[in-house]
Image (spheres, rainbow, N blue to C red):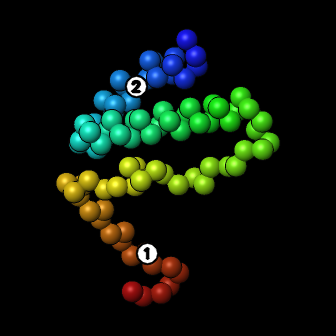
Amino acid sequence: MTSIERLFTEHHSTLVHYLVRRLGDRDWAEEVAQETFLRALRYLERAEGDAGASEPDDGRAPSAERRVPPSAPAAPAAPARRIGNERA
């Protein structure tokens, strides 16, 4: 069994259950989990190859992770902070 197969076997179910609770949508959770494992596979392939020649990840989440579900509540606005002796 390869390292990615072992990683998938040991963690896929737990990750999907966690994502279903967080996202509230099973299909979306499966999509995000799949993207997570694809990223892990790409990383492992780069790590096993020539690490010096690989491009760094841009750090952006895949589109599935950036989506906001329609049922998600809006984030509350941060309260205004006073700085020094200024009056609001």
Looking at the image, which residue is at 40% across and 25% down? 12
Type of residue at label 2?
His
Q: Is residue 7 above or below residue 57?
A: above
Whole-number angstrom distance, CA of label 2 to CA of label 1? 43 Å
Give the crowd class for mark 1: few <14, some 14-19, many >=20 residues within 10 Å: few
Q: Is residue 84 above or below residue 37?
A: below
Q: Residue furthest top?
A: 1
Looking at the image, which residue is at 29% across and 65% down? 76
Q: Element at badge 1? A: loop
Residue 76 at least partly seen: yes
Looking at the image, which residue is at 53% across and 81% down? 84
Q: Nearer the viewer, residue 73 or 78?
A: 73
Q: Nearer the viewer, residue 32 or 76?
A: 32
Q: Tag 1 or tag 2, which sits nearer the N-term?
A: 2
Q: Element at badge 2? A: helix
Question: What label does residue 81 carry, if any?
Answer: 1
- Quadrant in which the N terminus appears: top right
- Quadrant in which the C terminus appears: bottom left
Looking at the image, which residue is at 23% across and 41% down? 25
Residue corresponding to mark 2 = 12
Q: Position of residue 14 (x, y in %)?
A: 37, 25
Q: In the figure, residue 80 lies in which quadrant?
A: bottom left
Type of residue at label 1?
Arg
Side (left or right) of 21 relative to 46: left
Q: Position of residue 16 (x, y in %)?
A: 34, 31
Foreground label between 2 and 1: 2
Q: Position of residue 70 (x, y in %)?
A: 22, 57
